[in-house]
Image (cartoon, rainbow, N blue to C red):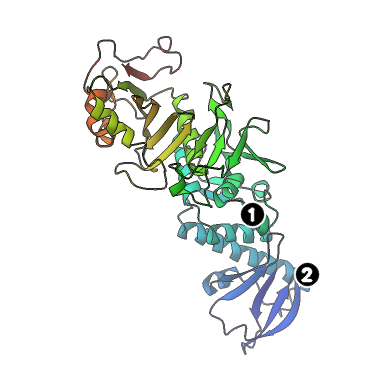
Amino acid sequence: MRWYEEDEKGKGLGKRWIFGQPVQCAQARAVPSQTCRVSASFGSQAIAIPSSQWKSARKPHFNDRRTTSTQWMTCSAAATLRALRLRLSAGLERSGLADVIRFADDLGGPYVAQAIWLVEKQRWDEVADALRLAGQLGFCHLPLTLRLQDLQEYTSKEAYLADARVVAQWTIVGRHVWGAGSFGLFRQGGLVRIFKNLPGYELTLSPPLPPSHPYQQHIDRDDPPVAHQLCFNGVEWAPDTKNDLFTEPSVSSFIMGTLLQTATHRMTDAGGIVGRLFRRKAGKQSHKVDALLSLLAHPHHGIPWLAGCTAICASQWRQAASCELLLTPFNSPFVAWIRIYRLDCDALFVHVMTTEAPAVDYGIFKECFPQATSMARPVLSRAAPLLFDKVHPKAGSVRDAGACSAFPEIHFFYEY
């Protein structure tokens, strides 16, 4: 580590300490903030430490006869590490990540410098939103504490930059998210796997897409499209038995979509689902089906094209397509989302799901979950009355675990 310290005469002649060895350097006092250069396996980088933080971290002067050279080197290293930690904390607050991640207190100087680079030089928007959603759904506790094992996923800055940014960041944080198993990424040679380090769990990054594919216009090299053969079997994520190839518009869309689909099968104490099958029948409902199909037209969560949605996740396979429309903000006490599943050009399934606590013990969906209903109505537009207001004779509420084994102890409504 390298850092600056002034001499006792204050004449602008200072000492620079390189791993505890002093060398002379001129005009150390002239700069507005001291500079600390940390050499580590992640790369050497200069880190400016504000003078206010530096003064608060200083130890007794190196010319103090009561302090031996060994003691001073130890004190100086500790002072620098404290200054780096102050810089890291300030960076987390400034970048809006303080509620999402933190770094373990036992990290050494080189790894604190690595953390500073990750926080200050990298954009975390997509991964931070996915972590906030995971926290809302109960799959992790925020802020996550990143430890030495996490930072050692990449041994150098070059290795980190060789991956797509979202992939690299999720490689660092993913193992802290638990749904039906870990959401961590595994590396096996040139393969990237999720959930389990086994054949069939591979993710194909940037798969070839035809020029007319709807995902083409939203491709981001920092958050590339992904293809996989994974589906949720009711218990865990596993390779699809039909060998369907699912294509997602981005890695972050895939992660948020898997979080929402996992949550659908883990709703227990509170929450509800209402669903309906929409079909064209000689002109009847055709305009409503068209309105729902339009929600699949621009399926990318990073494009705020649809008012009332916080995020949009999508998937395509064979001739089918689906999307999840997240309705609630990332600081909401509950989560509500819409899932649209297109079977063919004439039929769709629509579900509205929420973890909102029911307002009443018995009733139709809009009475039990008024907040989720009010959020979904403007998004569903003309299809909303058929979903929420038309009560099917067989529709009702279920609070008995034996009545609906797939979703125990929740309000469940299903209409055709």
Residue nearest the viewer, comparing 307 with 315? 315
Q: 24 or 346: which is nearer to us?
A: 346
Q: Amino acid under label 1?
A: Ala
Task: State whether residue 138 appears in this view.
Answer: no
Task: Give the class, few, some or many, for how many residues have Cα within 10 Å of label 2's Cα (few <14, many ≥20).
Answer: few
Which quadrant of the rendered structure holds the N terminus?
bottom right
Query: Do we see residue 247 in this rendering?
Result: yes
Badge 1 vs badge 2, beta-carbon distance below 8 Å: no
Numbered mark located on residue 162 in the image:
1
Residue 222 position, x and y percent, is: 53, 52
Which mark, by number, is residue 329?
none
Residue at point 57%, 34% (across, down): 228
Q: On screen, 177 above or below 387? A: below
Quadrant in the picture for the C terminus: top left
Say the numbered circle drawn on residue 70.
Answer: 2
Q: Residues within 10 Å of mark 1 (few under 14, many from 20)?
A: few
Left or right relative to 87: residue 308: left
Whichever of labels 1 and 2 marks the residue nearer the N terminus, that label is: 2
Q: Where's residue 357, x and y in %?
A: 34, 27
Residue 410 % position (x, y): 38, 20
